[in-house]
Amino acid sequence: MDLISSTLADDIGTITLDHPAKRNALSAALVKGLLEALADFAQRKARVVILRAASGAKVWSAGHDVGELPAGRRDPLGWDDPLRHLVREIEQFPAPVIAMIEGSVWGGACETVLACDLIVAAPGASFAATPAKLGVPYNISGMLTFLNAADVRIVKEMVFTARPITAERAEQVGLINYLVPAAEIDAFTLDLARTIAGNAPLSIAVMKEQLRILAGARPMSPQGFERVQGLRRLVYDSDDYLEGIRAFQEKRKPVFRGR
Ligand code: LCV
């Protein structure tokens, strides 16, 4: 069963998340489909990609597939995790990726959307960073994705409260580029894509890569990195981490005890 669909027309690639039964959770299988579509578009020299869910989706994506998170004792967001691959491929894709959002976006999907180059959202859309709700120690490059997308105070609000922020608020704080009525969002996003596709692709590709390298150039000493990795290990080895995953699977509110 295909969990995504993709089309390429007039140099514009469109990828649609299509696994509503699991609210487009970013499972390894769904991410594999996304990566294959992006690789195909790169090979066919797409000049811009639109990443979307089905029209009228209530949930754009529920984030990392919780059922695929390790049950403790292993970094849940290590280098080879499918979500980490997806974020890197979007950032390194040689053309702009536009996230077109209808519905709610959760956790790793929120980071995936923020890793896109432009974001167009409809009223009713929302964005939630959920590690604190699950007891997950988010990873450093993931935190950098958030930090590059919003003021640190907004990032702290998102990650400490784990509460969704509305598309309206996201526009106010500059988290998204455009807020467009649902009835117009398809045409608006296609027009934006067409504008980009009509410009010089080589110039755009090099500016996107320059911005990626500059945005990633944040000083962190080896000692600082090791300290953070040690702190993250304490979290994913904690009872709270197991409790977060268990509570999600038992469809109940987690009880975190700070150990
Ligand atoms: C697997 C799911 C999921 C799901 N995984 O429908 O950023 S971090 O660190 O937190 C990172 C590790 C991460 O991204 O973690 C995931 C964060 N995501 C969330 O916290 C959102 C979890 N999902 C929900 O709160 C609800 O599913 C929403 C509000 C998205 C939709 O609610 P709704 O009532 O429409 P259900 O909850 O009934 O879900 C429908 C089916 O999708 C599965 C869920 O288990 C259910 O499966 P069953 O029908 O087999 O029970 N599902 C939803 N999200 N992230 N599976």
Image (cartoon, rainbow, N blue to C red):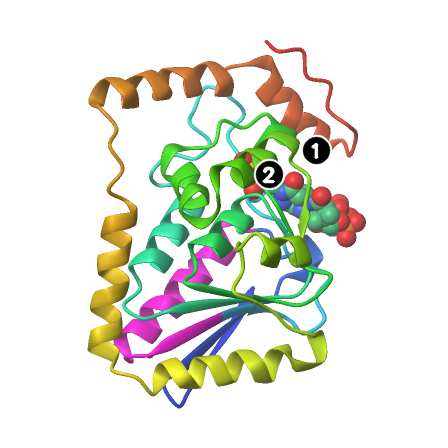
> Majority secondary structure of the magenta segment?
helix
Q: Quadrant of the N terminus?
A: bottom right
Q: Residue at 64%, 36% (x, y): give it.
A: 162
Quadrant placement of the C terminus? top right
The quadrant in which residue 117 appears is bottom left
Badge 2 density bin: few <14, some 14–19, many ≥20, Cα 10 Å: many
Label 1 residue near ligand 1, CB within 8 Å: yes
Q: Quadrant of residue 211?
A: bottom left
49 up-or-down from 11: above or below: above
Looking at the picture, how far across and down is residue 53, in whole percent? 61, 67
Residue labelled with disc 2: 158
With 83 as the anchor, is 17 left or right in this view? Answer: right
Q: Position of residue 195 (x, y in %)?
A: 41, 84
Taking the image as drawn, is residue 67 in sight? no
As drawn, the residue found furthest toward the front would be 172
Query: Quick one: SS at disc 1?
Result: helix
Q: Nearer the viewer, mark 2 or mark 1?
A: 2
Amino acid under disc 2: Met
Residue 185 visible within the image = yes
Q: Residue furthest right?
A: 252
For mark 2, give the secondary structure: helix
Say above or below: 12 vs 51: below
Q: Which residue is mark 1?
A: 248
Can you tell me whether the CB of the residue at mark 2 lies under 8 Å from the nearest atom of ligand 1? no
Residue type at numbered disc 1: Phe
Q: Is residue 32 inside the magenta stretch? A: yes
Residue 210 figure quarter: bottom left
The structure residue drawn at horizontal position 65% and vertical position 58%, both measured from the top left corner, is 167
Residue numbers of the magenta segment? 26-50
